Image: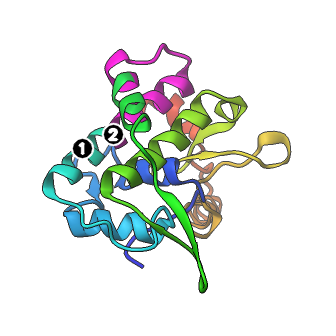
Amino acid sequence: MEHAFPCGNPALDFVGTLRARRNDEPAEMLGSPRSLDAWFRESGVTGADPGSTAADLAGAIAVREAIYALVAARLVGQEYDPEALTLVNEAAAQPDAVPQLSPTGRHVHATAAQALSTVARVAVTILGGPDADLLKECGRPECTQVYLDHSRGSRREWCAMATCGNKMKAAAYRARQRGNPPLTPSRQSSLGE
């Protein structure tokens, strides 16, 4: 697989295709129409590559950034940016991917616009419903992945334990061994990092 899906949610995993977005050089995972096709297929939004074009890629990246802008605003309690809101709503208003049943099982074939509409609709459902209160951003400073915290007591700190959680726990262990307090998200913000 070319892409990672730590959230198990197509809209939030789609936002995560721009990794470490606050770094000087974030990692763009959607570098070509082929990588966009791979994301749609690997995420399960479609069952086959939709045949994305350069224009589809540009539109998908614009919608991804609009979804992130809305999520980021929600996380800090700000009003939604009207342009981001319009862009996500326009994408969601397009026909979405439609599953089909065949003798061999369920299949989803879609154009890039239909696949993007499916992702936008999931974002609308999250941001417009009770799950919006569960949105969190990963506590690892280099990660900007957003996820839904369904943990008991809303105590989840990382997008995924296998990646960011292990890195943060290892860093905390090394800091304890050196006699330094671990760098937690709250300590990091107090240090102005």
Does the magenta stretch mainly form a helix, a strand or a loop? helix
From the viewer's perspective, is residue 118 above or below residue 86? below
User: 172 or 88, which lies in front?
Assistant: 88
Q: Which residues are magenta?
A: 64-85
Q: Are marks 1 and 2 in contact (CB under 8 Å)?
A: yes
From the viewer's perspective, is residue 132 above or below residue 144? above
In the rendered image, which quarter is residue 93 located in? top left
Q: Secondary structure at mark 2?
A: helix
Q: Secondary structure at mark 1?
A: helix
Q: Amino acid at mark 1?
A: Gly
Q: Residue at x 40, y 63 (%)?
A: 40
Q: Tell me if residue 69 is in the magenta stretch.
A: yes
Colour scheme employed for the rendering of this structure:
rainbow
Could you say where residue 193 lies in the image, as x and y percent from the top left? 41, 36
User: 11 or 155, which lies in front?
Assistant: 11
Q: Residue at x 59, y 56 (%)?
A: 7
* Residue placed under numbered mark 2 in the picture: 63
Q: Amino acid at mark 2?
A: Val
Could you say where residue 182 lies in the image, as x and y percent from the top left? 61, 51
Q: Residue at x 56, y 62 (%)?
A: 6
**Total number of numbered labels?**
2
* Residue placed under numbered mark 1 in the picture: 59
